[in-house]
Image (cartoon, grey):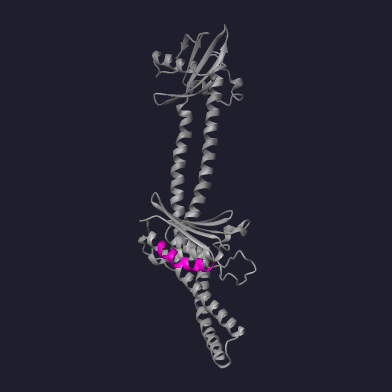
Amino acid sequence: MFRKLRIKFIAIATLSMIIVLSMVLFLVNLITYRNALEGVFDTVDFISSHSDSDMTGKDFKQFRVSPETQFETRYITVIVDESNTMVTFNKEHIAAIEDSEVESFVSYVTGTRSRRGIFIYDGLTYAYLRVKDEGNVDKITIMDCTRNLYLAHSFRIISLYIGVITILLFVLIMSIFARKAVQPMVNNIEAQKQFITNASHELKTPLAVISANTEVMEMMNGKSEWTESTINQVNRMSELISQLVVLSKLEEREDLVLVDVDFSGEADKVVSSFKTVAETQGKRLEADIAENVNVKADEKGIHELLNILVDNAVKYCDEEGLVKVTLHQKGKTAVLTVSNDYIEGEGEDYRRFFDRFYRADESHNNEKKGFGIGLSMADSLVRMFGGRINVTYKKPQIIFTVII
């Protein structure tokens, strides 16, 4: 249990770290790429708005470029007419582009609706800008921006490595210190279990004495409502102590070995044992149990789970109501439902039904004997088997569903 607690703590902390780190790296990469892209378009704007003989220094600050930009930038300028036919081009500022490739570039740019953008050709990245020029023609400037965006792409890869290494280091550090982090909780749980064990042993002796004294009083003076009430309360207290001990031991079973269990057979046995009880109370118990439903579980645990749910359904079913148990295979999982009529169930807080000592009847009267421990035990058993349990209410029935 404590090993699972440490693993869960590490998993939650790591997941939180991954989410935060991913958001930070995503924002940093986004800002870096956006700044690089703005620099590229500033350069293209500067080149497009100046002729080769008019690249004066007066507009450098306006376009956020340096005086060396005009010499270090590799670009092509193309003039196209109204029908997007290339009229002329100038590629003296770039050496690695053939004339046929210029036509491919122009074909791509004229085929898009956007006036500016980015495209990739032969593994290299180019930015383009299309503006109206004199004589009712368009001037297209195509610039090689591979180097400009290389740092942004490199930073993205580096940040990915940094993120992975950071997460691995975080998991390693958390694995070292997780024990100390959960130790106070572990100590608290251990103290609670020790208290339950010690209290159970201490209470058994006075209860045995009270029971024996009451029986002697009955032998001497005969039965009375007082002695009968005392014996009932002693039995009730003994049952509570037994359930607490069982629940405590359930949570300590870390080495549970799951085996193939005949879920259908166990369900038939439990339903058969409760039929007489239900009929005696004027209630109907029906079952729809599919054959050959097997699960990986513990045989005693499955029997106890079924016993708790059916007992709870019979106990809290309305007078002359219906209790129904169904079991069927759904894919690789087994689905068990136990329902009972419960007209007054609307408005109950069903999320708390598996809390220890919770009872919907806040007065805790003794008409329906129970301590609010049974469903908590059922929840622990289902979790031990790697399944899940939930409760829903569809008037007039309350329905418990177990999926294993």
Q: Position of residue 160 (x, y in %)?
A: 45, 42
Viewer-closest of 167 and 312 = 312
Residue at image location 54% in from the left, 32% down from the top: 34
Is residue 180 something one can see in this rendering? no
To which quarter of the image does residue 300 belong? bottom left
Residue extent of the magenta highlight: 267-281
Is residue 390 something one can see in this rendering? yes
Viewer-closest of 202 and 99 = 202
Q: Is residue 314 left or right of residue 62?
A: left
Residue at image location 46% in from the left, 45% down from the top: 163
Residue at image location 45% in from the left, 60% down from the top: 382
Viewer-closest of 226 and 373 = 226
Q: Position of residue 384 (x, y in %)?
A: 43, 62
In the image, is residue 373 above or below residue 154? below
Q: Position of residue 268 (x, y in %)?
A: 41, 62
270 part of magenta stretch: yes
Q: Is residue 258 left or right of residue 37?
A: left
Q: Quadrant of the C terminus?
A: bottom left
Q: Of all residues shown, which one is farthest toward the bottom?
A: 220
Dominant secondary structure, magenta? helix
